[in-house]
Amino acid sequence: MAFSSYREFVDALDRAGELKRISQPVATELEITELADREMKQPGGGKALLIEKPTVNGVVSPFPVAINTMGSHKRMAMSMTADSVDAVAAELGSLMKAKPPTSLREAVKLLGTALEMRHARPKKVSSGPCKEVITKFEVGSSKSEVWPAAPDWKNPSTFNPQPTTLLNLPILKCWPLDGGRFITLPCVVTQDPDTGDRNLGMYRVQVYDERSTGLHWQLQKVAARHGRRYYETGTRMPVAIFLGGDPVFPFAATAPLPDGLDEFLLAGYLRRKSIEMVKCETNDLEVPANSDFVIEGYVDPTEPLRDEGPFGDHTGYYTLPEPYPVFHITAITHRKDAIYPATIVGIPPMEDFYIGAASVKIFLPIFQMNFPEIIDIALPAEGVFHNAVFVSIKKTYPMQAYKIMHGLWGMGQMMFTKYIVVVDADVDVHNTSDVLFRLCANTDPQRDSLFTKGPADVLDHATSEIAIGSKLGIDATKKLAGEGFKRDWPPIIRMDEAVKSKIGRMF
């Protein structure tokens, strides 16, 4: 059953024993990060945290902060209303295999059809809980207006006379050298001005003041492509950011969907119910009606970029300041009982590891449709998403591992992968020790390594130039004669199965 609000999801985590409630005040400046980091480093990701009294500059916020809510395999499955992420992947895979595609373009079309099979296409509604309290800002003025959309005049507590701004939301300053407070779990909605296709992405948002932020959409992201078209025409670009609502939204925003496929379609598929979308108050973009917070505004392509950062990033290092567009706030709307969802990133393992692992599992069938020899793929926590990728294949001909390397580097965000290690089908790629054993045992460094060049993650501080770098592929599979190997390949040491069974029965 789909969640109607983030609070409903938090309550479900509580009932499942997956939540710790923190009743004492905890500062949004660094303290929540320290608390959450300790929890995320616990075995299996620890528990979700609900900070009931977060403080902003010493003042208790009326909005509790939820963090680490997707920081385990179990909680990721719960966010998708599923028993396990593997079950979700198996179902989507079976739909895709019903009619195998003959090309990548056909595979993308088939994926869209598969997602629609649950009647998951978003639908428009006239209003929703996200508009219970509305604060509008006059462009170029310091004035603001605030009112409940449907106030109960017999209950004065439903009327909030104080405008909601970026300065009184419980937005975190995560790490000591951060350039300010950052919205860390924002779902950012943009629209292609030419086709009308919308995109849902996740790009960190640095607060500059009560009504402006930086928008860190990296060079290769879809929102950046949308932005370039507005910069070319010189027209204002509408942007909407929402937080909360159904917990599946952050996953959909980070999922590696092909450009042009609506992420809200994926979200509707995962929650088994269409997303109700409502038009923003001050622009024509649509956001989920059950969101907890919606921040509306625009980017003005005629004004200069502004430095954004530093920010303690998922790489485990700070990303240094770089110029990015300024997002001007025209309205903030929210539920009366809103919960502010947040996350932190840094030295792994963190919450984002579980989100990334879920993406790999769910989209593995898509990779296998293009590369049927692939058995499994893993993104180890130490690789902070795409720095390292382990792939197991059923190898049947020479140089097959190199085919896989080139193919993966050409697929979406896999272009950022610095190291790809290919192993045989009997290796558990989720066991880093097993992969490293095969890498060390099965390779001759010069013969089995491939260096190439390509796009790099703009967050990668190690490249000599921003967004440009090199890649290393390592073939750690058993070598075949056609690969220049002229010796006999020895068998790996394994115990006789009958002996294993006998000892198992005895002890």
Image (cartoon, grey):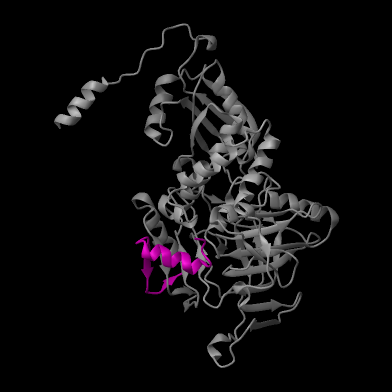
Segment colored magenta: 1-29
Furthest residue to the left? 506
Q: Residue at x 64, y 59 (%)?
A: 188
Where does residue 261 sit, x and y in percent of width and height? 68, 48
Above or below, 68 against 57 in this view is above
Where does residue 235 sit, x and y in percent of width and height? 83, 60
Q: Quadrant of residue 287?
A: bottom right
Above or below, 349 against 139 in this view is above
Q: Is residue 411 magenta?
A: no
Q: Is residue 6 magenta?
A: yes
Above or below, 389 against 76 in this view is above
Where does residue 437 sit, x and y in percent of width and height? 38, 26
Q: Is residue 76 left or right of residue 266?
A: left
Furthest residue to the right? 233
Q: Residue at x 46, y 47 (%)?
A: 85
Above or below, 440 against 45 in this view is above
Q: Is residue 381 visible?
A: yes
Locate the C terminus by quadrant: top left
Q: Is residue 30 visible?
A: no
Furthest residue to the top? 486
Where does residue 479 sit, x and y in percent of width and height? 48, 15
Q: Residue at x 69, y 41 (%)?
A: 109
